[in-house]
Amino acid sequence: MMKAAVLGATGSVGQIFVQLLSGHPWFEVSVVAASERSTGLKYSEAAKWRIPTPIPKNVSDLDVVDIEPKAVKNTEDVDVVFSALPAEVAGKVEESFAEAGYVVVSNASSHRMDPDVPLMNPEVNCNHVCLIDEQRRRRKWSGAIVTNPNCSATVLTLSLKPIHDEFGIERIIVSTMQAISGAGYPGVASLDIVDNVIPFIRNEEEKMQNETLKVFGSPSKPAEFKVSASCHRVPTLDGHMEAVFVEPKREADPESVVAAMEKFVGEPQKLGLPTAPAKPVVVRREEDRPQTRLDRMEGGGMSVVVGRVRKDLTLMGVKYVVLGHNTIRGAAGCGILNAEYLKAKKYL
């Protein structure tokens, strides 16, 4: 078992990390770290636990330590650090851990667009792991920072991967319907979101556009197709739904796109990684699926569910709806899958 630390462990994504790592065959949470208002408390006292399953017993009585390498090292020698820190805090903190020799698997946006930091959605671009070697050479540290994409970009890129591989992509238009948990706790005020849709999420459209191009590019150069995103907050708890319109490079009809999605497996499935879903892209053929409440936990929340694949005459391609669990596949789960891939490739 490898020892893991979770930074930002008391927050909403930090709690998902703790929950998903409970009983993991490779990683065990041995250190929980958070801001100074929580340090010194037991994890069960500091974390206002909002997940239906109980706090894992092996984590409940851990003392919360400060988010600095010295505090973690004084508590336990750990093999991997999972970061669920807010972006405004994560940048310098994650760098300090990498300088201290730790491999940091981050859900934060601070380093996603750094040219020497892998932005990995493992089934889509696990080959970008090679950037770790460049990062270590350039920054002269023995640790590393690896990030996963924004939650909405994670769902989008996983659904696009079979199309990209089979037909190529010229341009994409995507319109999102994003759950309130994507805003973190306490999310969006009830007076704002109940009986309402909010057609603006700060920086979200830019993240979707830029991160999608980095994910589909080579390790050193972003992809050259065009992405246009419009992002909206809707009154669902978990699960981001997206309406996607794709113009492929080569002719693609709905039936051939569905066939490509249904046969698709990525490197995590071939390696048998513990968190990898058997089918990363699940296609539903009913006219009214996917639905958020019914389909967000497909593959333990690690699959994306596609439906309504049909011809699009405007872009001369296809259009479809995709759903993914934003805090599992789109956040902590993707980070854990990244760490599993790092271990399989001996970066851990």
Image: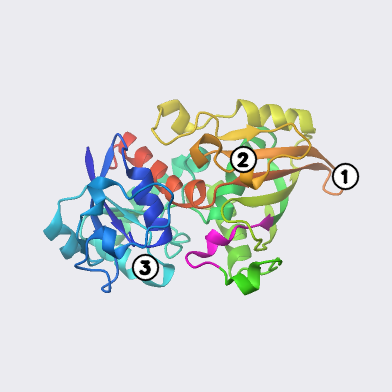
Q: Could you classify mark 3 by the number of other residues whose Cα lies within 10 Å: few (under 14), some (14-19), or many (20 or more)?
A: some
Q: Amino acid at mark 1?
A: Leu
**Is 317 in front, or is 177?**
177
The single residue placed furthest to the right in the displayed view is 313
Q: Could you classify mark 1 by the number of other residues whose Cα lies within 10 Å: few (under 14), some (14-19), or many (20 or more)?
A: few
Q: Position of residue 11 (x, y in %)?
A: 39, 62
**Is 101 in front, or is 325?**
325
Q: Earlier in the sequence, mark 2 or mark 1?
A: 2
Element marked by disc 3: helix
Q: Is residue 141 visible?
A: no
Q: Nearer the viewer, mark 3 or mark 2?
A: 2
* Horizontal arrangement in the rendering, residue 210 relative to residue 3 (left or right): right
Measure the alpha-carbon separation of dots 3 and 2. Answer: 34 Å
**Is 1 in front, or is 62?**
62
Relative vertical location of residue 264 with respect to residue 42 in this rendering, above or below: above
Q: Amino acid at mark 2?
A: Asp
Q: Position of residue 231 (x, y in %)?
A: 67, 62
Residue 182 counted in the magenta span: yes
Q: Circle 2 sits on which residue?
A: 295
The N terminus, quarter of image: top left
The single residue placed furthest to the left in the displayed view is 74
Q: Quadrant of residue 97?
A: bottom left
Measure the alpha-carbon separation of dots 3 and 1. Answer: 44 Å
Q: Is residue 113 visible?
A: yes
Q: Amino acid at mark 3?
A: Gly
Q: Circle 3 sits on which residue?
A: 91
Q: Could you classify mark 2 by the number of other residues whose Cα lies within 10 Å: few (under 14), some (14-19), or many (20 or more)?
A: many
* Horizontal arrangement in the rendering, residue 252 relative to residue 85 (left or right): right
**Is 59 in front, or is 281?**
59
Residue interval drawn in magenta: 176-187
Q: Circle 1 sits on which residue?
A: 313
